[in-house]
Amino acid sequence: MKGIFRSKPRTPAEVVRQARELFVYVNRDTEPRESKRQEKLSSLRKLILEMRTILYGEDQAEPVAEACAQLTEEFFSSDILRIIIICLPKLDLGLRQDATYVVANLQRQRVNSRLIASDYMEKNIDLVDILMPGYEDSDIALSYGAILRECIRHQVVARYILDSELVKKFFDYIQNPNFEIASDAGATLKELLTRHKSTVADFLSRNHQWFFQDYNSKLLESPNYVTRRHGVKLLGDMLLDRSNSSVMIRYVGSLDNMRILMNLLRDSNKTIQLNAFHVFKLFVANQNKPPEIVNVLISNRSKLLRFFGDFKFDKEDEGFEADKAQVIKEISILEPGNNQSAALGKC
């Protein structure tokens, strides 16, 4: 008779509810029998994989929209996200990764065109305070970082971080000696400072002085080349964004900022040199250069022209060559008191 009466497949909501019960069990951590604990973890692993299959599809089969919607609604209404975040450090690497994939996907799921993850995060914004310190624990840094990055897709989360002291922590996290963690923190900082244009522009305008002082000293002048590389690339992304035009004008009006970029142009790393050039060209293209910047460019004219004459990369880039030619031209014709320069094509 066995096999005649097959068990009814679990609905997406049932999968979430059963997984939540097991996460609560894992979090209690009161089971004295290791065999029983492993049995529960095995069941949890199957449920997480089932969730992942619903959300991502399987083999050639695409995800079913209705099933994804049911899972998403139950996931956020049951508050399972909180218990998952708390439990992640107690899971093995494989289960932790699968749970992270599920959480990341659910941040993007829409139900009736509504991004309910955003509503959830607004009501549970304290979860950000749990995720951020994850970068200080090498075991969970990448998992918490991936979840945090997806949460930052919601403007309410980005604004919360930017309006708190949390944003300053990134300057430390990105200097982590562990390359993977430093790179992950760099990716999260980029998401924070480039996704929500109006929010970021407002933040940079209100916090320009302290932010760029810290940014310059901790990232651009860091002894760690990975930190410098992340820092100068992100700086270019921010300043070249049209939403930050007023921030860019203020930044390129500072002689101290220009000196830092001139030093980065001499970096031994070619990628850093190239990204530094894309920021330095903004100083040269500025049509209202302060006299002190004009004077420094003139006093260093011969060195700069010689440097840019030899400034080449293995891969040909017509845009780069055009920008370089324009920079050379602008520096060549500079005169004391002459602050009118043509804008570069890519600025």
Image (tube, rainbow, N blue to C red):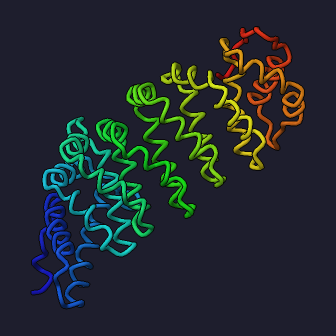
Quarter that holds the C terminus = top right
Residue 252 visible in image:
yes
Quarter that holds the N terminus = bottom left
Q: Residue at x 49, y 48 (%)?
A: 171
Name the residue nearer the viewer: 256 or 184: 256
Residue 62 visible in image:
no
Q: Residue at x 76, y 8 (%)?
A: 338
| Picture layout, residue 78 above or below residue 252 | below
Query: In the displayed structure, does residue 70 sit left or right of residue 272?
Result: left
Query: In the displayed structure, does residue 104 sit left or right of residue 253?
Result: left
Q: Position of residue 96 (x, y in %)?
A: 35, 68
Residue 289 appears in which quarter of the rendering? top right
Q: Residue at x 26, y 68 (%)?
A: 87
Name the residue nearer the viewer: 307 or 58: 307
Q: Position of residue 346 (x, y in %)?
A: 66, 23
Q: Residue at x 27, y 51 (%)?
A: 64
Q: Position of residue 126 (x, y in %)?
A: 23, 50
| Picture layout, residue 246 above or below residue 63 | above
Query: In the displayed structure, does residue 130 sit left or right of residue 225?
Result: left
Q: How many marks?
A: 0
| Picture layout, residue 181 above or below residue 270 | below
Name the residue nearer the viewer: 134 or 20: 134
